[in-house]
Amino acid sequence: MELIDGKELAKNIRANLKEDVEALKQKGIHPKLAVIMVGDDKASAVYVRNKSKACNEIGVEYEEFLLKEDTTMDELLKLIEKLNKDASVDGILLQSPIPRHLDINEAFRTITPEKDVDGFNPVNVGKLSLNQECFVSCTPYGIIKMLETYNIPIEGANAVIIGRSNIVGKPLLQCLLNKNATVTICHSKTKNLEEVTKRADILIAAIGKPEFVTEYMVKEGATVIDVGINRTEEGKILGDVKFDEVSKKASYITPVPGGVGPMTIAMLMANVVKAASNRK
Ligand code: NAD
């Protein structure tokens, strides 16, 4: 079994991006990310802090907009529109979740596709499904990067994703399909899940249930990618995969923490640098 070291890989990606940012600055372009957070979700605060740290490290300017829990849709859209027009801002990220009274889909639709570094605007989602140049959402992008770096064959592989969310499962399905994998997507209504997952050469768990994937669900020699971030009451972070068991069967596996998480942030940085490079 080989561990896929997302932390180390992300570090290398950030180091390369730092050089790209330097080169952009020589041309008078100072890449900038604007992050909007609504309310005070604790997990979001941690993610946002990690994003700001990554920006600092590679020299990307970072501005945070903290909106109150009772912010109206109108106020949120006005801020997005202001950032859309601001020529100094390359990327706009709306941290989810946002309070229930707000329409996140409308917010994502309002972020201009050129600054949509999370790849959630329907234009980027559509382009991804057509295999056209676009901003790819960061978690799937990071997963593909890990597979490619470790030379894990995607073309022709049986890839099985557990979870069909708009931010992980669905865009990952497109990414893997674009790389010629045979992709199956499973969800809470899937029957005989174990039978499906056991066929996977590449198994990706994006469920949000601690240690859901056990050894009985995994084929000998499979590559297992664990997207889950589940906080226990004791403050421990667990993935969606029962690591101790599954790592004995897998040929490659990502740890939690230190796998998909840091890669997601590194790819966000890559998208911000790409947006800045696209500046007219
Ligand atoms: P979500 O809640 O939106 O989706 C969960 C999916 O799991 C759903 O499609 C659901 O159908 C499926 N599911 C639930 N129970 C199931 C069952 N019993 N059998 C089969 N499928 C089942 O979650 P999400 O936003 O995609 O996130 C999933 C996990 O990944 C969470 O732990 C989240 O914190 C984590 N996450 C991590 C990163 C990262 O960068 N590492 C990024 C995004 C999400």
Image (cartoon, rainbow, N blue to C red):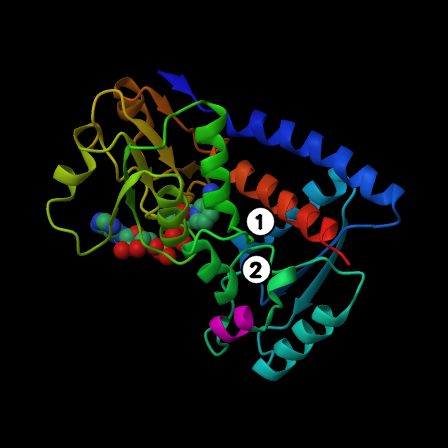
Q: Which residue is mark 1?
A: 47
Q: Quadrant of the N terminus?
A: top left
Give the magenta part as a residue range: 105-109
Q: Examine the image and state in which quarter residue 218 appears.
A: top left
Neighbor class of circle 2 (other Cα within 10 Å; few <14, some 14-19, many 20+) is some
67, above or below 159, in the image:
below
Q: Quadrant of the C terminus?
A: bottom right
- Residue 170 is situated, as x and y percent measured from the top left of the image, at 36, 54
Kind of residue at badge 1 = Tyr
Kind of residue at badge 2 = Gln
Is most of the magenta stretch helix, strand or loop?
helix
Q: Do we see residue 10 in this rendering?
A: yes
- Report if the beta carbon of the residue with label 2 is closer than 8 angstroms to ligand 1: no
Q: Which numbered tag is attached to residue 158?
A: none
Q: Are marks 1 and 2 in contact (CB under 8 Å)?
A: yes
252, above or below 177, in the image:
above
Relative placement, left or right, of 29 versus 228 is right
Of residues 67 and 275, the one drawn nearer to the viewer in this rendering: 275
Q: Which residue is mark 2?
A: 95
- Residue 36 is situated, as x and y percent measured from the top left of the image, at 64, 64
Q: Residue at x 16, y 52 (%)?
A: 190
Q: Residue at x 54, y 51 (%)?
A: 133
Which element type, helix, strand or loop, lies under badge 2? Answer: loop
Which element type, helix, strand or loop, lies under badge 1? Answer: helix
- Report if the beta carbon of the residue with label 1 is closer than 8 angstroms to ligand 1: no
Q: Earlier in the sequence, mark 1 or mark 2?
A: 1
Of residues 184 and 134, the one drawn nearer to the viewer in this rendering: 134
Relative placement, left or right, of 95 versus 53 is left
- Residue 67 is situated, as x and y percent measured from the top left of the image, at 65, 70
